Amino acid sequence: MKQSILLLIFFCFVLQAYPQKYVKVWSDEFNTPGLPDSTKWGYEVGKVRNNELQYYTYKRSENARIADTVLILEARKEAYKGSDYTSASLLSKLKGDWLYGKFEFSAKVPTGKGTWPAIWMMPTNDEYGGWPRSGEMDIMEYVGYNPDNLYYTTHFEGTDGKKHKSSGIETTYPQPYSKFVNFTFIWTPTSLEWYADGVKKFTYTKPADDKRVWPYNKMFYVILNLAYGGAWGAQQGIDDANLPHQFLIDYVRVYQLK
């Protein structure tokens, strides 16, 4: 018994002396001009979801390129494969997939009606079933018709029988299109936390050991995309006058506890 107590005291001392800390395990600083790094990013292709107007293109520098150490996702008005608009959506699936961690992004959103940029995470495998049963974590969303607001949301099945529940917040952020904003997302076994420029904006705490309200115990990957129009982006119409629009990302950094 005495030996067990001494061991417990010893381990408590070790934990205090050497606490867990976040260590960077994956990143992209976008320092190399040209197309995005193919070892880190794949592409969504086509007209994918939400009745959006753009066609997501594959390895097309007009829509996704690195210049001046920044990733540029560009939405353009042009005829392309049956669509009148093009843009890009990059994803780290099977190139950067994680279970828990701290995720940091520096990004500058576009402005103008119709724009709908997002930084979000989706499950690598739909182990609990199709959307939203396996979860979705929206680290940042923005719609151009509401230019001084940012959105932080998570989606899951829920237990009310409606098969879709979300938890999140809309926050005021004056002119996020005028500067790079640092977005931090911390995902642990018991909570999801959203920060903008170091200020906590929202927390979703694990309600129960129930996949319907907490499917966030599986691997997820990152998506960076610039949508145009669609179910949310075009709620107050679109304005093509200022196209092309650019969503700029300065860096993506992923940390895990060591």
Image: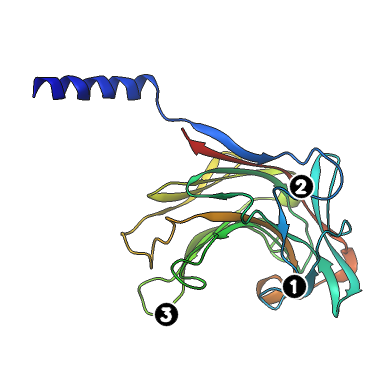
Q: How is the image coloured?
A: rainbow
Label 1 residue SS: loop
Which residue is rendered at x = 77% and y = 75% of the image? 53
Q: Are marks 2 and 1 in contact (CB under 8 Å)?
A: no
Residue 162, disc: 3
Q: Amino acid at mark 2?
A: Asp
Above or below, 43 relative to 103: below
Circle 2 sits on which residue? 37
Image location of residue 229, percent across then percent down: 74, 73
Badge 3 local density, few (<14 within 10 Å), some, or many (20+)?
Answer: few
Residue 159 drawn above or below residue 32: below
Disc with the residue nearer the chain's start (3 vs 1): 3
Mark in front: 2 vs 3: 2
Residue 235 in view (yes/no): no
Which label number is shown at residue 229? 1
Residue placed most toward the observer, 67 or 149: 67
Q: Which sits earlier in the primary sequence, circle 2 or circle 1?
A: 2
Instruction: Name which residue type carries label 1.
Output: Gly
Does residue 182 appear left or right of residue 258 in this picture? Answer: right
Whole-percent x, y for residue 214 in the image: 39, 60
Tag shown at residue 18: none
**Mark 3 to mark 1: distance in Å?**
26 Å
Mark 2 to mark 1: distance in Å? 28 Å
Q: How many labels sit on residues?
A: 3
